[in-house]
Image: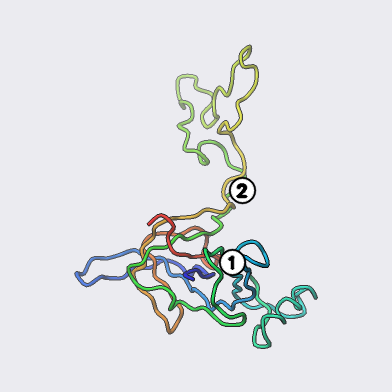
Amino acid sequence: MKALIGKKIGMTQIYDETGVVIPVSVIQAGPCPVLELKTQERDGYSAVQLGYGKKKAKNVTKALLGHFAKSGKDVSPVSKMKEFRVDVDSELEIGSELTAEVFEADEYLDVTGIVKGRGFQGVVKRYNFGGGRYSHGGGWKRKPGSIGACEFPGRVDKGKKMPGQMGNVQRTIQNLKIVRVDISENLVFVKGAIPGPKGGIVTIKKAKKK
């Protein structure tokens, strides 16, 4: 299974063999212990539940402590858990660990994370509206302008671009190329930008559409 939970370290740049600069995002991918295996016969679908990070036992509920105990004595409480669907029942063992070595350079990934929260924003920042004119009696500058009609349809259409909460939502960037993998430090260097701030939790898995 080619999927891991990781943390966004930040962005940097590296050179390829020809001396071309490549902007990369650095992800600390794993180690991720296998916490549970879902099987087609027992659960109706096949999946692998992975963990990431560490958490103090005193900050974990008894239900989760029991769940971690089933995964083996060597598995300490984790801060993040994620379930990954697989096509067939996995041959992994509960309690084993997955590291960055499951990926190789030149493979393609789908990276999922929570983008930065921007708070309540207007339409100019949120949707790149042009706004109104600033001269000759404009008077509405960064406002959205007309949002509907009076008589017909007599309401605002659903999905109308309006001011509101911006960011802090889950987003996936597809088909990002792996430039380099550092197995000793569990680092994956991915070409381009990925969602989320530095230190944000991301999930990486083999590209679905590549």
Residues at discs 1 and 2 in contact (Cβ within 8 Å): no
Near-viewer residue (135 or 84): 84
- Going from N to C along the chain, the mark reached first, 1 or 2, is 1
- Kind of residue at disc 2: Gly
- Foreground tag (1 vs 2): 1
Q: What residue type is labelled 1?
A: Ala
Q: Which mark is residue 31?
A: none
The residue that label 1 is drawn on is 47
In this figure, what is the number of numbered marks?
2
Label 2 SS: strand
Residue displayed at 52% across by 32% down: 142
Q: Residue furthest toward the bottom?
A: 73
Q: Position of residue 46 (x, y in %)?
A: 59, 65
Q: What x and y, as percent, mark residue 184?
A: 43, 84
Q: Is 113 on the left-hand or right-hand side of 60?
A: left
Could you classify mark 1 by the number of other residues whose Cα lies within 10 Å: few (under 14), some (14-19), or many (20 or more)?
many
Q: Residue furthest front?
A: 41
Q: In which quarter of the image is residue 53?
A: bottom right
Assign the C terminus to one quadrant of the image: bottom left
Q: Residue at x 59, y 72 (%)?
A: 50
Splitting the image into 4 quarters, where does residue 151 fall?
A: top right
Which is more toward the observer, 132 or 10?
10
Q: Name the residue under label 2.
A: 119
* Residue 93 higher or lower than 9, as above or below: below
> Picture coordinates of residue 72 (x, y %)?
67, 85
Residues at marks 1 and 2, CA–CA distance in whole angstroms: 35 Å
Image position of 172 with respect to 163: above or below: below
Residue 17 is left or right of residue 104, and the answer is left
Q: Label 2: how many residues lie within 10 Å, few (<14), some (14-19) or many (20+)?
A: few
